[in-house]
Amino acid sequence: MRTEEISTPKRTKEIIARHGFSFKKSLGQNFLIDQNILHNIVAAAHLTPDKGALEIGPGIGALTEKLAQTAGKVTAVEIDRRLIPILEEVLSPYPNVSVEQGDVLKVDLKDLFARHFEGVSGVSVVANLPYYVTTPILMKLLEEKLPLENIVVMIQKEVAQRMAASPGSKDYGSLSIAVQYYCEPQLVCTVPHTVFIPQPNVESAVIRLKVRDKPAVEVEDEDHFFEIMQASFVQRRKTIANNLKSRYFPKEGRERLEELLQQAEIDPSRRGETLSMEEYAVLSRVFLQAGIR
């Protein structure tokens, strides 16, 4: 008979006390102690016994345990060496779980997938991410074009809103476009700070990113597309013409820039946050055809 679930406040505190574990603020460690939130996270990933789950930052294994009860194979990558013996102990009832120590930003993820997820019908990333490295981790997962079905993560609420934002809204920006280029975002739920030990100072949210079979728009040069888009948001209060002039025509060429914007059917007086991803794709194509990089 298995012991009490890891995610209860009582068991979490008992594990922490027994191992003499102390939280490192520098690693953004906040452990979840709410069964309902964990259920919502796992349910959003649509896992089944023939699928795999990659968890980043498992902590003491509260979410890992839920994943192990749902997915066929679970691999967790933990940066904090102090947590490895704790994870090995509390997850011992689950033979379908493997734990690796390392920094996911430095891990060869293609190699990890080859070693741990052979034979599964699909893999999702499911994690309570450290807030200070949310964006670098997500962009690594997406840019490496891993064979992922979903990315379901608990992140800072403000960042989740930016990822799911539509053109013209105050939250819409370069992160919105970068994420939506690769994924279809869906906000799953908001999470109060009271369901963590220790409690963070910010509100959290769970977001599901359904990874697209192919990017949302067709572009000739992805790097150039993202550069154009990011240049358009350097100063949000400036028009797109002024932002692009600073980046691509710093000394002269205002007339040339306005000609290119006209070709792309974009009003120079618009701001970057009003342009759709499709309009950025057209703009990138026009700039490339004009030899501007």
Image (tube, rainbow, N blue to C red):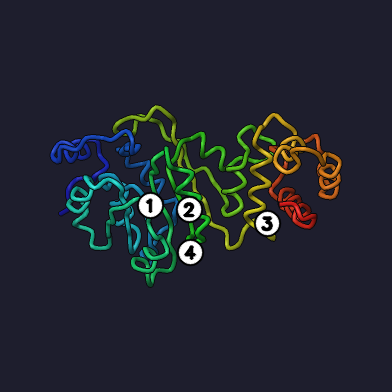
Q: Nearer the viewer, mark 1 or mark 3?
A: 1
Tag 4, which secondary structure? loop
Q: Quadrant of residue 169?
A: top right
Tag 1, which secondary structure? loop
Disc on the earlier residue, 1 or 3: 1
Spatial separation of the CA atoms under disc 4 and disc 2: 13 Å
Image vertical order of residue 147 relative to residue 254, above or below? below
Spatial separation of the CA atoms under disc 1 and disc 3: 28 Å
**Viewed as shown, does residue 194 lie left or right of 138?**
left
- Determine the residue positioned at 43% across, 61% down: 123
Image quarter in which the N terminus is found: bottom left
Task: Please state which amino acid type lies under the numbered disc 4.
Answer: Pro
Give the residue number, with chain letter if any, for mark 1: 104
Spatial separation of the CA atoms under disc 3 and disc 2: 20 Å
Disc on the earlier residue, 3 or 2: 2
Give the residue number, with chain letter if any, for mark 2: 140
Near mark 3 (Cα within 10 A), the count class, few <14, some 14-19 or many ≥20, is: some
- Determine the residue positioned at 20% across, 40% down: 11
Give the residue number, with chain letter if any, for mark 4: 147
Disc on the earlier residue, 3 or 4: 4
Mark 1–mark 2 CB contact (< 8 Å): yes
Q: Which mark is residue 217?
A: 3
- Determine the residue positioned at 66% across, 41% down: 231
Mark 4–mark 1 CB contact (< 8 Å): no
Task: Please state which amino acid type lies under the numbered disc 2.
Answer: Lys
Spatial separation of the CA atoms under disc 4 and disc 1: 16 Å
Image vertical order of residue 19 relative to residue 74, above or below? above
Q: Nearer the viewer, mark 4 or mark 1?
A: 1
The total of numbered circles placed on residues is 4
